Amino acid sequence: STSRPSKDPSSVQADVLQNLEFVVGAPSNKIPNGLDAKSVYRGVAASVREHLIDAFNRTQDYWSEKDPKFVYYLSAEFLMGRSLMNAVQNLELTGTYSEAVKQLGYDLETLRDAEQNAALGNGGLGRLAACFIDSMATLNLPGWGYGIRYKYGMFKQAIDEKGYQQELPDIWLSNGNPWEIPRPDITFKIGFYGSVDNFKWSPGETIIAKAYDNPIPGYKTATVGNLRLWEALPVDEFDLTAFNEGKYDKAVEQRRKAEDISAVLYPNDATEYGKELRLKQQFFFVSASLQDALARFKAKHSDNWQLLPEKAVFQMNDTHPTIAVAELMRLLIDEQNLDWDTAWGIVQKTLAFTNHTVMPEALEKWPVKVLGKLLPRHLEIIDKIDSIWKDSLKEKVLAQVEEMHKKNPPKPKAAKEVPLAKKAGAPAVPEQAEEEEEEEEEDPVEAALNKYGIITENPWEKGVKLVNMAYLAVVGSKAVNGVAAIHSDIIKRTIFKDFFELTPNKFQNKTNGVTPRRWLAWCNPGLAALITETLGTDAWPNDLNLLTGLRQYADDKDFQKKWRAIKHENKARLAAKIKERTGIDLPTEPLYDIQIKRIHEYKRQYLNILSVIYRYHEIKTASPEERKKFVPRVTIFGGKAASAYYMAKKIVRLINRVGMVVNKDPDVKDLLKVVFVPDYNVDWAEALIPAAELCQQISTAGTEASGTSNMKFQMNGCLIIGTMDGANIEIAEEVGKENLFIFGMDESEVPAWREGKRAEWKDYDPRFVKALDMIKDGTFGDEEYFQDLADSVSDMSKSNDWFLVAPDFTDYMRAQDDVDKIYQDQDEWTRRSILYTAGSGFFSSDRTIKQYADEIWDVKPVPVPAA
Ligand code: 26V
């Protein structure tokens, strides 16, 4: 083959120069010293890319030759962040590139910051997908990610002078993208609309999906995996007839319409599933991915489709790709001529589904009208799946109904029950029909069957039918999993109860994990070095349970000192970044307390800021003598609010307003600082997490499916104040519950409170009342604007505090007091910090992916021989 990129430092330097000249096209009199960081970054990245592509080609050729079973991870989101340092470090070329870049008069750190963040995801779900493909490559598992190459990623967040969030477009491709390989030869046709005649679909519109491959380097392995992202393009670039008629805009209309499909990531991680364009995006990438994978299969095994489940498994990341159930059926039946039963048998062995939320508004249900117009053949298929499914249950349901009647004979028509009043603030409950129409008695078997229906009537809108995508996925999959123990348990009891009772073995748990390379080894080099030195091995990033070896040093005073010094360095590094980005000066001695995540009522940033407000009040009203007793704190928030999420945007503004008042108050000085970091993203996370001493994981119990930042903080020795929710529970098991600051109601207590077991306003915690009063009296300005935010947790005629901010406040304050107390005992604090890191092995995404591979995918590692 051709010559391979050399890893020798002087060759790397020559290679960078060559790339600066021929790839970047820099004028030779400016190479290397007259260039800006962005240009040099491109030259260096182009050079690193050669190493990636070399190992990538080897891997993909080897896998193709061996033909093992492949996993395809279908996800509408991959939140990759930056790639340069990750690639260099995963390829073990850090020393070589640092040296080469230094010789050229630059440093790698500066170049690192010249890279744009690839933010093709909203939050946890998208970042999880990124961690998963990192682990797949590291574990040598044959597999690809499949997704969308959005032209615009997650919007950029700016905070205006009033503290209000502004959304700006994320033009992430403006400096090129050296990490992708365009594949103009890999394209598939994607149809939309049209009609179905005798089971034959004639799409009314066709576009093209074009592949871009993104090599994903594993760590300490020759394996480089692949993330294949699809771009939408028109079949015909240009309408020549229109052009010749002088209708220039019409001539490019097709292009624009097609390109819209991969133009922008939907920036809302809960709603918006009514939108046709969103369904278009989903079908677009699912169809392209399935066609691609089936073509690869067919090239090897021609029409031996029975073999498909032994060669491929598709993991559906949430409901977003679940149209795959219908599309795989269509491809097998309409394109490959299989009969229904054979196709269905294959589908049910080839697909698997992960649920990531129980929030009702995020469970996608497509109006039959929207789905049927865009994908008429798929609606027909879904309809048939639905009726076969319900038929298969008839006997069982009949028996159940008879059983029930035996125990509880149906009464002769009794008086109508009085409907329960709609609870204020609760996620909408179907309106009771206005006029009491002569309701026809529903057949009890029909009624019992309906709860299993994939296609059901919208309970909020009579006569409107919806396709429940989660149900479709459950029926069409071989396995269904939640993302933390409690969450997997909840879905069996709630949203999938009826399905769980029928097929209990389908339901599994796969507790999330995060890659310890990016989230410990690379983002916290100081701590990584100390860990390696202490354990006497650098094998831990691939075998994270080795971290338990740190436990024996938890009480070692010398070790604690070193541990603290690193945290302090990281705090100083973060303070410098915050100064540069916001102008705010931060002291580095106080406790660094951080909450970073999407802004959501259920995540309760509001609870956090209310306690900050009360702390401010306490400091203000204390005497100078009393002030000395306060434990100084820096409270940092970061996160984006969906642009149409009214309450979330108010919370952003409130946090910013509190910061503006507190930070300049001469009475407060260094006792309290409140910072909102604008445009929170993966890059910010890499700076914030290693510096954090306390992180807030304070969701209402039962609402946060898992959380993954909790694991990242834990790995970096950051203590948790949190509820018994999501993966916090498992973290508490690994670290010892007594080492976390746990507070609040647990999941089993929440329903009773919501159903009315609550305090009178006069019994509210006076500190809570005080904090609300300060918002309402204009201490932070904008009191009218904040009124309904205050009402949302106090005025029961307007809202019922669905997320339990008021009832959890008192215990939250108690936990905050514990935090202050323990922080004053630095040895105890550090001891706990060490125990957190030592107990984080379980939360490596390598562990998670191994479980998926063994328990769902049945995919085995195929290590690529070293070159
Ligand atoms: C839903 C929707 C609905 C349509 C509009 C666009 C959109 C985008 C994302 C979502 C998914 C919401 C679910 C989600 O993000 N779940 C989070 O998944 C994490 C990884 O498993 C988990 O750690 C978080 O607890 C969970 O909230």
Image (cartoon, helix red, strand yellow):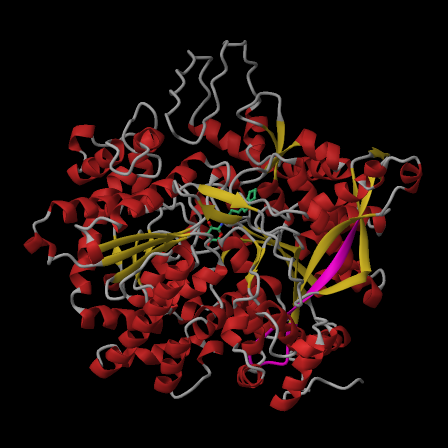
Residue located at (25% from left, 39% from top):
807
User: Residue 144's quadrant in the figure?
Assistant: bottom right
Above or below residue 482? Residue 215 is below
Determine if the magenta segment contains residue 321.
no
* Picture quadrant where residue 424 is located: top left
Name the image quarter holding the C terminus.
bottom right
Q: Which residues are magenta?
A: 208-224
Query: With respect to residue 666, does 545 lie above or below?
Result: below
Position of residue 97 measured from the top left corner of the image (x, y, whole percent) = 57, 82
- Relative to 50, is 317 above or below? above
Residue 284 visible in the displayed image:
yes
Q: Nearer the viewer, residue 529 or 707?
A: 529
- Please provide percent x and percent y for residue 510: 49, 59
* Left or right: 343 in relation to 772: right
Q: Nearer the viewer, residue 244 or 277?
A: 244
Count of numbered tags? 0
- Percent of width and height locating residue 173: 65, 58
Does the segment drawn in magenta span residue 215? yes
